[in-house]
Amino acid sequence: MFRGVMTVGIWTLVSRILGFARDMLFAFYLGTGTVADAFFVAQKLPNLFRRLFGEGAFNAAFVPDFSRMLVQEGREEAHRFAEETFAVLGFWLLGITVLGEIFMPQMMLVLAPGFSGPKLAVATTLSRIAFPYMLFICLTALLSGVLNGLHKFWEAAAAPVVYNLISIAFMLGLTRFVPSVGHAFAWGISAAGVAQLGILMWAVKRAGMAIRVPRPRLSPKVKMLMVGMVPGLLSAGAMQINQFVDVIVASFLPPGTVSLLYYANQLNQLPLAVVGTAVGTALLPMLSRQVHAGEDGKAAHTMNRALEYALLLTLPAALALMTAGVPIVSVLFGHGKFDHQSAVKTAQVLACYAVGLPSFVLIKVLQPGFYARGDRKTPMKIALGAVVANLVMNLAFMVPLQYMGPALASGIAGIGNAGAMAIVLHRRGLLRMDTQLRKKLPRIGLASVLMAAALWFGQGVLFTPFNHHGIERWLGLMLLVGAGAMIYFGAAAGLGVWRKARV
């Protein structure tokens, strides 16, 4: 499992670094203005489907069924199931894409009810350009599930790198021919979807499971998959649904709020994707095989190690984002129209998001504990409760906290979501911390606190945002991050975190 985590994590890290380069270009050209707000709303819709299917609901339903067929019914039956699913999914997604293009103005009234006039018109146009990405990325997610079920992780994990490369290329090369950077980026999103699908079609063929598209037919197994996806869409998509609630509320707040949430969330997504998604992606197929093979002891050990791997990097990441947010934001995005005030506000939003970061990573680890055993309803019920709580807190925080309210509401809702899932798994006897995990967690926590204290004092010495220029700012941030990493890993080693660890 650790090899799978490392494979997915490294490729995700590369993708995220390119994503930051992309966002730095976007911040330079558009900052947090009207067009930026319109674009970030426009890309929410296709990205919702990407995260739901690529990182959530589809894999939660498909990978356990595909893994079970590989173990119990053989490779040929699993291959047939993948082809039937591809055909049915493609047929329905094509219909949704056509309907989305037709009714996009009405959809924008739901997604951003606070937008009006030119801002609403730009958001609608950009959404129509980017929406076809939904079709391509959802089919790509199916192919990723096939590869993950075969324990082949690198091709699926590398596909998002192509997304960011093409997005950057379109921003740099197409902007002069279209009305804005936002338009160029939107075209790049759809083009990237085509490229990602093509790459994974090649990858599954290379793995011996070339997808031939039969006539769409709802076979009994495909029907069971589609029914199983409904609770998965709600449970695995709770974070994305909460982000939509955040955007709806933010559309009523002062201009620039949507952009502040976007930039802060991109930074928060780095450890969530590199650690949470990587662990969840590698854990689900392995846990599914162990459960279906009756290897309960191995399944319990696998879950404990997944929790250990996840928290080993997530706890220090969350505290680092809380304490050193201003230097990080100002260096990455503080150029052009992105001024010092925008950097400070974004850092404040980032700190609110980071409150829930460990919980969101734990959700990625705990959900496979249900999905591998065919239980998709329990996570759905818990997720629905988190969505309601997020909405209530958004409304309560809207006036007193302004732009920080949506982020803090999401973080607290995530804590409740993860806590409820852990309690249910524990009561069912499916989650028991072993001796190694019980000893490691307090030591990881102490090492993280020591690192955060060092970052708090060190940033005043090594880095003063916006007083440095060019290379000095980058060197200051590199020294700060490097010193924090050395202190954390040094403290962890001194406290015995590495003893008998398999990391």
Image: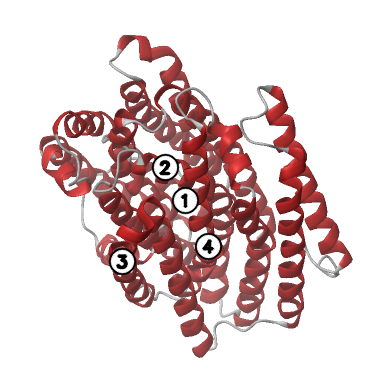
Q: Where is residue 406 in the image (x, y as percent from the top left)?
A: 37, 56
Residue at image position (36%, 9%) is: 176
* Residue type at tag 2: Leu
Residue at image position (68%, 36%) is: 464
Work out which quarter of the rendered image holds the N terminus and state it.
bottom right
Q: What is the spatial separation of the Cα atoms under label 4 and label 3, in whole angstroms?
A: 18 Å
Q: What is the spatial separation of the Cα atoms under label 2 and label 3, in whole angstroms?
A: 19 Å
Residue 500 horizontal side relative to residue 353, left or right: right
* Residue type at tag 4: Val
Provide the residue designation for mark 1.
349
Residue 260 tag number: 2
Q: What is the spatial separation of the Cα atoms under label 3 and label 1, in whole angstroms?
A: 16 Å
State yes or no: discs 1 and 2 in contact (Cβ < 8 Å): yes
Mark before the other along the chain sequence, 4 or 3:
4
Q: Which colour scheme is used?
A: secondary structure
* Residue type at tag 3: Ala
Q: How crowded is mark 1: few (under 14 residues within 10 Å), some or many (20 or more)?
A: many
Q: What is the spatial separation of the Cα atoms under label 1 and label 4, in whole angstroms?
A: 10 Å
Q: What is the spatial separation of the Cα atoms under label 2 and label 4, in whole angstroms?
A: 17 Å
Residue 355 tag number: 4
* Residue type at tag 1: Val
Secondary structure under tag 1 reads helix
Question: Of all residues shown, which one is farthest toward the top?
Answer: 176
Residue 396 tag number: 3
State yes or no: discs 1 and 4 in contact (Cβ < 8 Å): no
Mark before the other along the chain sequence, 3 or 1:
1
